[in-house]
Image (cartoon, rainbow, N blue to C red):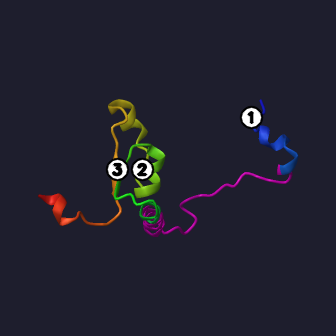
Amino acid sequence: MELDWHMQRSDLAGAGQIELDAEKIDVDESALTLGRLRRVREQMRRFDIEAQMLNEPVNVRYACGARNMQVFSARNGMARYQLVMCQRKLPPSSLS
């Protein structure tokens, strides 16, 4: 059974599947995660958003690096959220 229908496209001639072994390549996951969070916060500033609540697993993963946790989610429902603040600290007025 052939499942890769993309190989029939003429604009993808010669394209192959990229196979990477995460353990064999040198990736600074902390820098990657911090860079993604920086970009999220840049867009929040651009659109004047002070805080946002993320609940889509892909968005949570992008913003903070948290893995999907499929087993946890299957048992407990989609109860994973992430609050992203434009600033790193809460403003003093919000603490009272």
Amino acid carrying mark 2 in the image: Val
Are the residues tagged 3 and 2 within 8 Å (C-beta)?
yes
Q: Counting residues from the N terminus, which is met first, the one under dot 3 or under dot 2? A: 2
Residue 24, image x and y in percent?
57, 64
Q: Which residue is mark 3?
A: 82
Q: Counting residues from the N terminus, which is met first, the one under dot 3 or under dot 1? A: 1
**Residue at 77% from the left image edge and 29% from the top image edge:** 1
Amino acid carrying mark 3 in the image: Gln
Residue 36, image x and y in percent?
47, 63
**Residue at 48% from the left image edge and 66% from the top image edge:** 32
Horizontal arrangement in the rendering, residue 2 relative to residue 45 (left or right)? right
Quarter of the image where one finds residue 78? top left
| Residues at marks 3 and 2, CA–CA distance in whole angstroms | 6 Å
**Residue at 44% from the left image edge and 52% from the top image edge:** 61
Q: Which residue is mark 2?
A: 60
- Per the rendering, the mark at residue 3 is 1
Q: Which residues are magenta?
A: 12-41
| Residues at marks 3 and 1, CA–CA distance in whole angstroms | 36 Å
Closer-to-camera residue (34/5) = 34
Q: Nearer the viewer, mark 2 or mark 1?
A: 2
**Residue at 34% from the left image edge and 42% from the top image edge:** 80
